Image: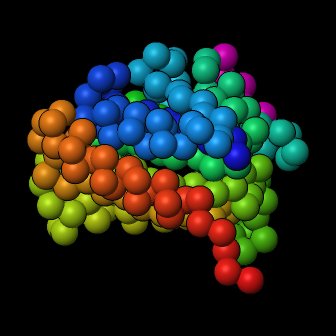
Amino acid sequence: MKITTILGSPKKNGNTAAFLEQFEKIMEQNNEINRINIKDKNVNGCLGCGSCRKKPDAIGCVQKDDGVSIFEQMLDSDLIIYASPLYCWGFTAQLKALVDRHFCMVKEFSLPHNHVSLLENKKVALLVTCGGPVENNADLIQTAFERLAFYIKSKIAGKFILPFCSDINIAKTQGATLAQQMADRLTEKPIA
């Protein structure tokens, strides 16, 4: 399986990176892992220009940044992991720019039940670290992720939240258990 992980943290070696790295180490034995550190990429926000609408079967974004190459890597994947620390109940600004740019991957959304997505049927998962509890804290990011998955017509393979993750030791200890659970869940064979 080809897995693209997108680390949305502005810190390449922070808590979210430590948690994600544990998951990647478990998965790398039988899968091809491609990590994208959004911090190292130049991804502008969506211009809302609609130029991508002129290319119904292609990404079609006119911006000359790293966004299009990231989307190409996502298209070549079987599973996409969106990994973000919780910032003001949502994605980091760095990852949010990419999330907004998903606009170029969806065509004819004015017909919500008949719209087309270049990412249709891709498996997606959410990985979040947060300094507090899940309840009344990490609920909005999960809702945003669910709506993103609906918009891009992808299949949610799981949502994994590591609460009370205030330092790297917690990310490594409690994260190890959750990373294994995440790997087990994402590699489950469907029951026929």
Q: Could you tell me if residue 150 is visible in this image? A: no
User: Magenta includes 62?
Assistant: yes
Q: Is 159 placed above or below 101 here? A: below
Percent position (x, y) of residue 185? 50, 64
Residue 177 in view, yes or no? yes
Looking at this rendering, what residue extends furthest in the front direction? 29
Residue situated in front as seen by the camera: 70 or 23: 23
User: Is residue 67 toward the left or the right of residue 167 in the image?
Assistant: right
The quarter holding residue 104 reads top right
Residue 133: image location, x then y, percent: 15, 61
Q: Is residue 147 above or below residue 66?
A: below
Query: Residue visible at 73% across and 61% down?
Result: 121
Q: Is residue 68 left or right of residue 126?
A: right
Residue 92: image x %, image y %?
Answer: 33, 38
Question: Which residue does the image show at 33% across and 55% down from the upper left?
Answer: 178
Q: Position of residue 48 (x, y in %)?
A: 60, 39
Which quadrant of the rendered structure holds the C terminus? bottom right
Going 22% across and 50% down the picture, which residue do you hit? Answer: 174
- Magenta region: 60-64
Residue occupying the far bottom of the picture: 192
Any magenta on residue 119? Answer: no
Of 110 and 98, which appears nearest the observer?
98
Q: Which of 33/41 is in front? A: 33
Q: How is the image coloured?
A: rainbow
Above/below status of 23 relative to 135: above
For residue 100, side relative to residue 78 (left or right) = left
